[in-house]
Image: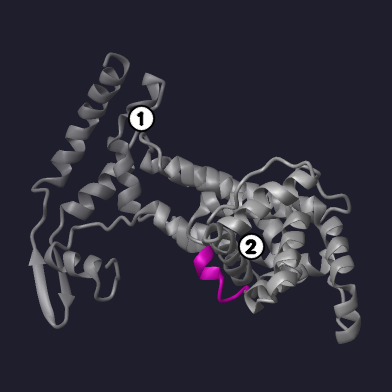
């Protein structure tokens, strides 16, 4: 619907050329990971295996009981359910990856028990995907990478979100992602990161697939190999996607001067506040525009009859806003 070529956005702008389109920011954030799936196959594998694993236990009370009670009690672990997650559900995806990593050995054991009972190909496929080193490594990396983006998602869903402050929060999230790149490339990975357990899980995968790897003459993947070929390029690509998704047009950004929350705290800064932004707004809405769509031309006059007068009125209005913000 929001297509710029022939969708809703384009058709509304043809009727009213002064209209500015604002997409749902949380939807844009959700699509960032989706856009990277064709490039990173291991990301697609994580998305697929998490959903398959959730369905496996969700639709079978018997299997769910085996997972929650039998094996978890045997390992003296806290019992909890797996979470349904998809690439467009940031909060649940982070939790789902973390729970699979925390219960990795338990999950593999329960899959082996189920497969030994009925030899179902679907169980074998899930088990095979969960013993692929790149898939597990990507799952661990997502546990750390999705955390700052989940915080950003929560902020965007807040009741009092400030549109003009979104850029600051986006930069903070991307700075955190850059920090993660530095931390995972150190000889000693920060123990606060879930990815710090990567060698431990790789060793467990090797123990569980050693016979099959000897038969097929497969080579081991090291954590450094994964980071060099997949992990670090993926984080850089995600940073670029987030930056691109949250680009704001100059006019939309300029409208932030009308939000009292953006006023300076010091009255001495009020005289120079927002003058350039108001000029930008006045020039955009104070000039006639035309739009051509499917060979039809739409023309409209200016929404502001006297842009210069509007700029002058704003100089007085911003002082009133400041007074009202102090004495609401």
Is residue 34 one of those drawn in magenta? yes
Q: Which residue is mark 2?
A: 236
* Residue drawn at x 75%, y 55% as measured from the top left: 106
Quarter-wise, where is residue 324 in the image? top left
Which sits in the foreground, 113 or 298? 113
Instruction: Determine whether the residue tagged by mark 2 lies in a helix, strand or loop.
Output: helix
- In this view, the mark in front (1 or 2): 2
Point out residue 226 in the picture as x, y percentages from the top left corner: 77, 68
Whether pointer 1 and pointer 2 mark residues with C-beta atoms closer than 8 Å, the reply is no
SS type, badge 1? helix
Q: Would you place residue 211 above or below residue 289 in this image?
A: below
Picture quadrant where residue 48 is located: bottom right
* Residue 130 part of the magenta segment: no
In the displayed image of the protein, which residue is found farthest to the bottom?
A: 216
Q: Could you say where residue 315 lies in the image, as x and y percent from the top left?
A: 24, 31
In this rendering, is residue 15 above or below 286? below
Per the rendered image, the range of residues in magenta is 33-40
- Does the rendering let one see residue 171? no
Q: Residues within 10 Å of mark 2 (few under 14, many from 20)?
A: some
Q: Quadrant of the N terminus?
A: bottom left
Query: Residue at horizontal 54%, vertical 47%?
Result: 150
Which residue was labeled with disc 1?
261
From the top left corner, tell me how far across and down residue 229 is, in percent.
75, 72
Q: Earlier in the sequence, mark 1 or mark 2?
A: 2
Across the whole image, how many numbered discs are drawn on residues? 2
The correct choice, above or below, for 254 with respect to 318 in the image is: below
Q: In screen coordinates, is 176 left or right of 276?
A: right
Q: Residue at x 68, y 60 (%)?
A: 139
């Amino acid at each position: 619907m929001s297509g710029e070529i022939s969708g809703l956005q384009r058709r509304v702008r043809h009727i009213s050329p002064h209209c500015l389109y604002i997409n749902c920011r949380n939807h844009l954030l959700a699509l960032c990971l989706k856009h990277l799936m064709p490039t990173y196959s291991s990301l697609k594998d994580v998305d697929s295996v998490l959903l398959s694993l959730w369905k496996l236990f969700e639709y079978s009370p018997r299997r769910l009981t085996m997972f929650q009670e039998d094996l978890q009690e045997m390992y003296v672990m806290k019992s909890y359910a797996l979470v349904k997650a998809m690439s467009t559900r940031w909060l649940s995806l982070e939790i789902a990856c973390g729970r699979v990593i925390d219960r990795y050995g338990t999950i593999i054991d329960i899959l082996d028990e189920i497969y030994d009972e009925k030899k179902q190909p679907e169980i074998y496929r899930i088990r095979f995907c969960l013993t692929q080193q790149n898939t597990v490594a990507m799952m661990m990396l997502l546990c750390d990478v999705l955390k700052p983006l989940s915080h950003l998602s929560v902020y965007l869903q807040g009741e009092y979100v400030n549109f003009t402050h979104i850029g600051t929060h986006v930069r903070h999230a991307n700075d955190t992602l850059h920090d993660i790149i530095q931390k995972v490339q150190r000889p000693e990975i920060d123990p606060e990161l879930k990815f710090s357990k990567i060698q431990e899980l790789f060793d467990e995968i090797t123990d569980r697939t050693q016979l099959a790897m000897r038969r097929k003459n497969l080579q081991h993947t090291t954590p450094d190999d994964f980071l060099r070929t997949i992990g670090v390029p993926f984080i850089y690509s995600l940073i670029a996607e987030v930056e691109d998704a949250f680009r704001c047009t100059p006019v939309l950004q300029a409208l932030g001067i009308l939000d009292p929350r953006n006023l300076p705290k010091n009255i001495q800064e009020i005289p120079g506040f927002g003058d350039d932004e108001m000029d930008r707004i006045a020039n955009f809405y104070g000039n006639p525009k035309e739009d051509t769509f499917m060979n039809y031309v739409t023309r409209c006059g200016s929404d502001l009859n006297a842009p210069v007068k509007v700029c002058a009125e704003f100089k007085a209005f911003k002082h009133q806003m400041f007074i009202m913000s102090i004495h609401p």
